[in-house]
Image (cartoon, grey):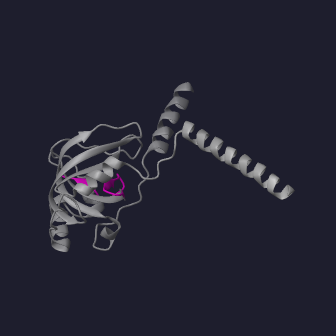
Amino acid sequence: MKKLIFFSFILFSNILLACDCPPLEPISKDISKKYDVIFYGTVDSIIPCRTEGIGTVYFTITNLYKGSAEQHISVDYDCTSACLMSFSKNEEWIIYAVFQHFDLVTVDLCSHSRKKITDGTADYYQVASQRTFEQENEFLKTTFGIQPYAVHNHLNDTQKDMGPRNEQPSAMGKLWLLLVSLGAMIIVYILSRKYFKK
């Protein structure tokens, strides 16, 4: 009985923890509108998962089909949840990505992104896309053409160095703001009482 309960727990926990992606329709010009950047490229390097569960993969783009991107691009991806992605150096990918915010491109497992299978294993992406990797690459080239790479903008570096503009003050900073505000309110109250007594 204990073995049956343990087996059921393992079975159902795997089902519950599996990534739940909706069925993918074959990529078309209309479906590609939901992606900001589409390219074919090779993995240069990977930065391991950071504490927030995000990893970064660096690509050299061979063909840029849609969007504005430099030839060498970093892409963030989920690397800890059930929907984690996995990349290895020198893999070739067709990436369908979106801008998370300024100059930050992200990709997720449930997108149309697919890697080129070279070791003879089954290409599961081919079932959903109804095209081989080469056929999809040719479809994108015919549909969108090859776009020019963006020129490196040093203003982007400045923006990254500055960080977000809406940073909150520290706990000590908030305390000082509260004390200064309280002091100002007391002064206004005292002055208004003296003024209205006259």
Q: Is residue 68 above or below residue 123?
A: below
Give the residue displayed 30% in from the left and 60% down from the top: 128
Give the residue displayed 41% in from the left and 51% down from the top: 164
Position of the N terminus by quadrant: top right
x, y percentage for residue 5?
55, 31
Give the residue displayed 83% in from the left and 58% down from the top: 196
11, 21: nearer the viewer:
21
Asked if residue 63 lies left or right of residue 17, the reply is left
x, y percentage for residue 53?
39, 40
**Can the viewer see residue 20 in this picture?**
yes
**Can the viewer see residue 124 in this picture?**
no
Give the residue displayed 27% in from the left and 39% down from the top: 47
Q: Is residue 13 above or below residue 74?
A: above
Q: How many marks?
A: 0
Residue farthest to the right, as pictured: 197
Q: Quadrant of residue 38?
A: bottom left
Asked if residue 175 lies left or right of residue 133, the reply is right
Q: Quadrant of residue 140?
A: bottom left
Q: Which residues are magenta?
A: 101-116
Q: Quadrant of residue 107?
A: bottom left
Q: Is residue 105 above or below residue 34?
A: above
x, y percentage for residue 126?
24, 58
174, 58: nearer the viewer:
174
The stretch drawn in magenta includes residue 104: yes
Position of the C terminus by quadrant: bottom right
The stretch drawn in magenta includes residue 121: no
x, y percentage for residue 174?
58, 42
Residue farthest to the front, as pictured: 198
